[in-house]
Image (cartoon, coloured by chain):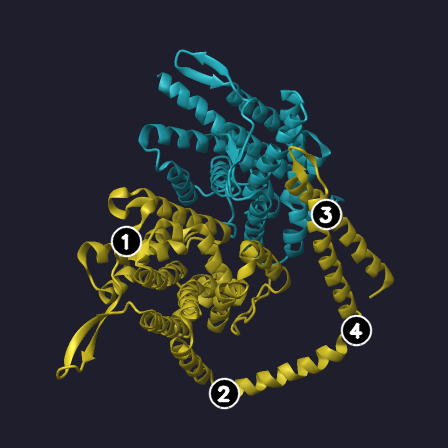
Amino acid sequence: MTIPEFKKHWTSLGIGMVWLFILLWPLLGIKPEGLEVASTFNVWWRIALGCSFLLFLYQLNSAGAFRFISRPAGAVAGSMKSATSMVPMAVWFVIGIACTALIPQFAGRYAQDVAINCMIYVCLGLGLNIVVGLAGMLDLGYIAFYGIGAYTYALLSVQFQLSFWICLPISAGMAGLGAWLIGYCSMRMRGDYLAIVTLGFAEICRMVLNNWMSLTNGPNGVTGIKAPGLYWFDFTNGMTLEHIWLKKLSLVYYVILILVVFTAIAVYRLQHSRIGRAWEAIREDETAAEVMGVPTFYMKLLAYCSGACFGGMAGAFYAARMRFVSPESFTFLESAMVLSMVVLGGMGSIPGVILGALALIALPEIFREFELYRMLVFGGVMTLMMLFRPQGMLPSKRTMRSDKD
Amino acid sequence: MEYFLQQLINGITLGSVYALIALGYTMVYGIIQLINFAHGEFFAAGGYVGVIFMSYLLSQGAPAWVCLSGSLILAMAYCAMLAVAVERVAYKPLRNSSRLSVLLSALGMSIFLQNGLMLTQGVYDKAYPTELTQGGFEMGNVMLSYMQLFIVSLTAFLLVALNLLVFKTRMGKAMRSTAQDKVMSALVGINANRTISITFAIGAALAAAAGIMVGLYYGSVRYDMGFVPGIKAFAAAVLGGIGNITGAMIGGFIIGMVEIFAAGYISGEYKDVFAFVILIAVLYFRPSGIMGENVDDTRV
């Protein structure tokens, strides 16, 4: 680091901080009683101090002051990585499932609740991962399919008393059908336009759910949805089969665990099939894939629909678990949430998506007292992540990103 | 007939608001091919800053025209500064990375700004002072309020000013040439970064003006009011042919009219759906919009 560079950083920080003060001041300090600077200053000096500290650390780091820590740490991380790669992926998968399966035995109600929530988002993230991570299509309306799945089960359960297990494939099918309808019109588009069309579709879906009073009961939502049921052996007098409702939280937990495992295996198999390769080819270069004989239109439609099917299944589970659905749960913000799980975790990588869901659902639960700042931090982290590590925390191994579009 | 005329007036009013927001989208998209998701937040921030300054000036005993024009100018200046800051932080470092990264960065900024507004100003509606905007002309049963007159004439003024800026000044020439080819215009000595920042600033200032108008028209602002008008304005920009300034104006008026007439004659509950249906239909049948040239394959 040279002296002019050093000066340049601090000058731009100074300008930035003055700029920030001007931006903060009207929002915090102008009251009808008069102009007030104290409260703005109060917020501002903390931010300024934090930023200066970060810049100081950054300059020390680029001057090489931390080499005595980072070099051994890097060596340790490298050897850890080579040690973990000795054990095959499947073993880690089994260990992970065994550990999650034990959670209801040892953890309390609250932790189970968080874990279930987390796993719903893992399902959603894995489904969206097919669309965004594998086929490279930006989908901002994914939550619509979650909503379609949830409402399909809710209505079938309330109107016709159908069982959860029958409705699960029906919900997936309905979501897939919805995806086919919108996808057939929009698969010719790429990039930003597709993003906007899917966003528009999700908003249309939400408004229909909100306004079709006779079917969906509008903003009040649907109540009285049945929990999943199961036939289980009953040994009280001889051996009979008894129907039990899975209302207990720990039993519901296993249902979603099975769904997660099913989804993860399905996505893994899809990714490593011919279809998955075609998707990845489309993601890397659509024109080249088409020239090489990949039927891009049908492959993209297939990716979109199969992603939606997993979303629909997650939705059906959500309806069965909450036993109540309302359009409130399917807003654009949820779409953004699932999308950022996929992107922050690492697009196209299954462990990445799981890590992303953990980071976005479980971490805020730990920092409960900062509840108010949660979405603020979320938005900020999303931007920062794109600036500093656009490939996500655990990027997929099979990419050929040139980082240019 | 009177009902129709009334709806026409309302439609023009709403359409001019959408046109102002759409201009920001279209200018930014035209110059760096980015859907600036945070644009709806500039609109909301403009509405908020407008109400803050307006009630401050009013409490200081300033006359009505000072309140209106002062808060308008201050809010526009504020949003221009905000837009430049956002562009510097979230978009400029990503200029050469993939489209997905920039779009997500924009999405993150939008969520950040929205929640920043919520944290600083609270979750409840903030009311605009009503005493500035009462009264109007009445012709039979058709009502044209001073507010609507103010909105339409201010929009007309801003649109003319923008057109003069873009087509008659050196700055406008730089913007147009940067939109066409960044590398070539840099070679002939145009500072691309500065031009992009100015484009952002102008777009956000127009959105801020729209925010104040909406606040005055409906009487209040809310921290999350930017999202739906933002998407509708984007629909307007696409309808007019994205990147095309005249197109954005026409698109804005069409979307506003369609919304008002659909609400009046078909169904009030589904009025928001029509903008999205138009958006999808336009992208399907004529992705280049009404005024746009043919968009090349990579962009669609």
Q: Mark 2 points at which residue?
A: A87
Q: In this view, which residue lies farthest toward the top?
A: B140
Q: Which of B59 and B177 is in front in this view?
A: B59
Q: Distance between the residues labelled 4 and 1?
A: 61 Å
Q: Are marks 2 and 4 in contact (CB under 8 Å)?
A: no
Q: Distance between the residues labelled 1 and 2?
A: 47 Å
Q: How far apart are marks 3 and 2 (CA)?
A: 54 Å
Q: Which chain carries label 2?
A: A
Q: Mark 3 points at which residue?
A: A41
Name the residue: 76% across, 44% down: B189
Q: Earlier in the sequence, mark 1 or mark 2?
A: 2
Amino acid type for the residue under numbered disc 4: Ala
Question: Vertical placement of A148 versus A74: above or below?
Answer: above
Q: Which of marks 3 and 1 is nearer the N terminus?
A: 3
In this rendering, do the residues under marks 2 and 4 share a single chain?
yes
Q: Mark 4 lies on which chain?
A: A
Which of label 1 and label 2 is nearer to you? 1
Question: Vertical placement of A9 versus A209: above or below?
Answer: below
- Disc 2 crowd rating (10 Å Cα; few below 14, some 14-19, many 20+) is few
Q: Nearer the viewer, residue B115 or A331?
A: B115
> Left or right of A253: which side holds A291?
right
Callout 4: helix, strand or loop? loop
